């Protein structure tokens, strides 16, 4: 059992020993290990990007009594690979009136924070790329940069739909950032730490979803809005804005936006798992598997929401965010504070 | 109660998630066409009396019947029967008007070909390789008795 639980850690030690055996000093080996970790994370992100889209299409199909992609490879498993190859082969199009630098940089500005968030995710006990003591602050700060990327895409495209989508994304994402952070505050108050590993360790007896159910609900709503997913996908809003911010994008740049969307989806689900669902804690199965199962469950829940609910109007989105979620999250902090004072 | 509709809606979609798929896996699974579907026409040459009513009622003149009088019995006999499916509008007039029910609608529906001429099919006598090769150019429509 111990062997399976520590399998990944032992592999990491093995790689480190391998590097050391070639005469590297301890510091150099640590540096190389960081590079290895980054490469592995990027690989996982690429995998999640491809199979997140596959899962979305498959689950969408199932909700509509269809099969979803099922032709390329067994069960359509290679569909995303084929789509990716097609997107790579596409012409690099840029509208004549677009701002070349802003237009070109926008997909990277959206993708980079999505990748950076992954650095602090605690995949298992002692498996985390950077065990930052201000982990959640880092996550919130980095992920808010995404808004800038979407606004850049909207502005740089020189297209009315894109600009409207970009403006909507700013209005929406900045509004929902506040309840998002406040909903996490309850957990931080109980744990007394911003470190994600400490937060997971504090949930050994009971998951925080039990005392923090209100915080969890607010978090799910605000996270859906932050991800720009249905029912909060006003940035894209096909029926009103063609494809909103993404209207003028095609080929690989568009693929980067999509990869960022699914990397973010995984990261947000992982944070929900870490904060409310006990992270990698669980019986029998190895911890990294528990983390993966819970995160996939959260992803399924987000997809389930997406294929159930219709899109909000922009005024409804802002009303919901400012008049319902914000007071609820503040109330949650208040209740948690009282409970903490009385019990702790 | 606020939010009850949300929960109920989520339950409804989850039921659909686990329900049986209604997709027909077409190339593997053959579609079940209605018995009276007006598919491309099929000829039973033994029943045909070469009256060429079908060619006359055809609104788009897509049927060509070539007949010959038998020198002994003095009866018309079918020499050739060809249809241009590319022009056929699937109205079914020929089927309705055939006095001997020699023409019926078939259940076939996969008519896609690489050449327009391939849609010009000779139903009698049936050429050896009709699907693959180009058949001879379309004949003048109508009746021709020789």
Image (tube, rainbow, N blue to C red):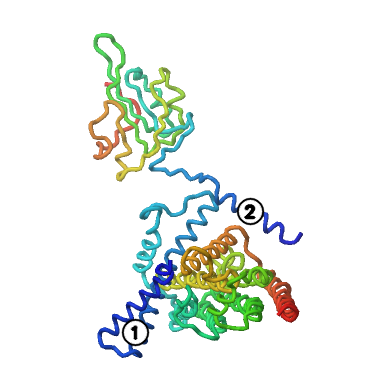
Image coords of residue B133 (percent x, y): 24, 39
Image coords of residue B83 (percent x, y): 34, 32
- Which residue is the site of mark 1? A32
- Which residue is nearer to you in this view: B48 or A78? A78
Choose top left, top right, bottom left or bottom right for residue A140: bottom right
- Which residue is the site of mark 2? B11
Badge 1 crowding class, 10 Å Cα cut-off, few under 14, some 14 to 19, many 20 or more, is some
Quarter placement of the N terminus of chain B: bottom right
What secondary structure is found at the residue carrying circle 1?
helix
Which subunit holds the residue at mark 2? B
Residue at the image position 46 percent from the left and 35 percent from the top: B32
What secondary structure is found at the residue carrying circle 2?
helix
**For the residues tagged 2 and 1, is the chain the same?**
no
Badge 2 crowding class, 10 Å Cα cut-off, few under 14, some 14 to 19, many 20 or more, is few
Compared to B116, does A40 lie above or below? below
Find the distance from the CA under tag 2 to the CA under tag 1.
49 Å
Image coords of residue B35 (percent x, y): 47, 29
């Amino acid at each position: 059992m111990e062997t399976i639980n520590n399998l990944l850690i032992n592999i990491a030690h093995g790689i480190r020993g391998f590097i050391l055996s070639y005469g590297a000093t301890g510091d150099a080996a640590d540096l190389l290990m960081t590079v290895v970790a980054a490469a592995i994370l990027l690989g996982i992100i690429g995998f999640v990007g491809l199979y997140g889209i596959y899962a979305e299409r498959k689950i969408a199909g199932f909700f509509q009594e269809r099969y979803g992609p099922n032709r390329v490879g067994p069960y359509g498993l290679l569909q995303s690979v084929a789509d990716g190859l097609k997107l790579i082969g596409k012409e690099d199009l840029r509208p004549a009136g677009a701002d070349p630098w802003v237009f070109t940089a926008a997909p990277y500005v959206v993708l980079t924070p999505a990748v950076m968030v992954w650095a602090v995710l605690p995949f298992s006990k002692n498996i985390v790329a950077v065990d930052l003591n201000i982990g959640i602050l880092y996550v919130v700060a980095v992920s808010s940069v995404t808004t800038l990327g979407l606004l850049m895409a909207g502005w740089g495209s020189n297209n009315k739909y894109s600009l409207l989508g970009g403006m909507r994304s700013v209005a929406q994402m900045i509004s929902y950032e506040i309840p998002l952070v406040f909903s996490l505050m309850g957990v931080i108050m109980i744990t007394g730490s911003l470190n994600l590993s400490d937060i997971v360790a504090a949930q050994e007896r009971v998951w925080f979803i039990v005392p923090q159910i209100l915080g969890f609900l607010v978090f799910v709503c605000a996270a859906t809005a932050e991800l720009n997913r249905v029912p909060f996908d006003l940035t894209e809003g096909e029926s009103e804005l063609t494809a909103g911010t993404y209207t003028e994008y095609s080929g690989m740049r568009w693929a980067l936006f999509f990869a960022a969307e699914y990397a973010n989806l995984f990261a947000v689900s992982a944070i929900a798992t870490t904060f409310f669902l006990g992270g990698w804690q669980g019986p029998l199965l190895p911890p990294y598997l528990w983390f993966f199962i819970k995160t996939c469950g959260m992803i399924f829940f987000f997809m389930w929401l997406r294929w159930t609910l219709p899109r909000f109007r922009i005024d409804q989105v802002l009303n919901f965010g400012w008049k319902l979620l914000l007071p609820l999250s503040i109330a949650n902090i208040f209740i948690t504070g009282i409970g903490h004072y009385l019990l702790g | 109660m606020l939010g009850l509709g949300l929960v109920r809606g989520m339950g409804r979609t989850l039921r659909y998630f686990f329900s049986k798929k209604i997709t027909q896996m077409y190339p593997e699974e053959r579609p079940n066409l209605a018995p009276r579907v007006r598919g491309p026409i099929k000829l039973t040459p033994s029943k045909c009396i070469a009256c060429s009513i079908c060619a006359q009622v055809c609104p788009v003149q897509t049927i060509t019947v070539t007949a010959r009088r038998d020198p002994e019995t003095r009866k018309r006999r079918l020499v050739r029967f060809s249809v241009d499916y590319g022009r056929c509008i699937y109205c079914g007039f020929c089927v309705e008007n055939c006095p001997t029910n020699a023409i019926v609608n078939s259940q076939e529906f996969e008519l896609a070909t690489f050449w327009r001429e391939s849609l010009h099919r000779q139903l009698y006598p049936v050429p050896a390789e009709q699907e693959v090769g180009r058949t001879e150019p379309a004949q003048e429509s109508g009746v021709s008795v020789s």
